[in-house]
Image (tube, rainbow, N blue to C red):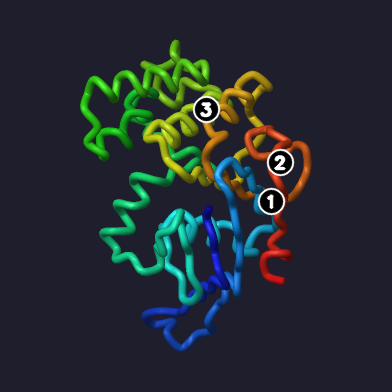
Amino acid sequence: MLTLHQVQKVYRPRGWLASGVETPALRDVSLHVAAGDFVAVMGPSGCGKSTLLNVLGLLDTVDGGRYVFEGTDVTRLRERQRDLFRQSRIGFVFQDFNLIDELTVYQNVELPLVYARVPAAERRQRVAAVLERLQLGHRQQHRPAQLSGGQQQRAAIARAVVNQPRLLLADEPTGNLDSANGEAVMGLTQKLFVIASAAKQSHQNEPFGCDCFAALAMTDVFA
């Protein structure tokens, strides 16, 4: 179980803007997600979706409340502990994919395993398996610029799941996947916590083109 309990986040002005107005981004947010759940956080730009994903992904800290990740109160972790926790348990799919242009698809997907010091033989096995699963085996030596938008998204998903995380976070992923690849993604993530953001609820904005996500409006989160 992944649980947020009355989480708060406030952005405070710094430096020469220190006398400015504080901006509350999350107010008493409570959320419970079970393994295997697919949750889409809906809402317009500026409502706090990205802030919520940053908190869930341990890229940002909270100013109040608790975040419990499978029994661990991560709000109590120190910075280095958060980094290690994030590296081993959380995968990210960014809105613009954030693939490294100078690296091949294979190298992009392999990178999290290199940082995690996974042995080379196991890295090769894992990367090859996930690329084949997402029908990118024939593209592994290509650069991101040589891929279509859908292929780039699949490469980003492969990189996010290759380290076998417990939580997958996606910031406004579009429906660039055909049905076969959509099913492959769901197969790779069916035992994870999967939380995605979307600008609004519509068929075109369904995360990864899948209609199996439960919608959670930010107006509901702030209620």
Q: Tell me if residue 216 can be seen.
A: yes
Mark 2: few/some/many CA within 10 Å (<14, 14-19, 20+)? many
Residue ID for mark 3: 154
Left or right of 158 in this view: 112: left
In the rendered structure, which amino acid carries the disc numbered 3?
Arg
Q: Residue at x 63, y 26 (%)?
A: 182
Mark 3: few/some/many CA within 10 Å (<14, 14-19, 20+)? many
Give the residue at the far bottom of this rendering.
Answer: 19
Residue ID for mark 2: 205
Residue 25, quarter of the rendered image: bottom right
**Mark linked to residue 45:** none
Q: Are marks 2 and 1 in contact (CB under 8 Å)?
A: yes
Q: Upstream in the sequence, badge 2 or badge 3?
A: 3
Residue ID for mark 1: 199
Q: Residue at x 49, y 38 (%)?
A: 97
Residue 128, quarter of the rendered image: top left
Task: Give the Cα distance between marks 3 and 1.
Answer: 21 Å
Q: Is residue 9 above or below residue 55?
A: below
Front residue of 60/5: it is 5
Left or right of 79 in this view: 146: right
Image coordinates of residue 220 in percent, x first then y, are 73, 64
Q: Is residue 127 above or below residue 34?
A: above
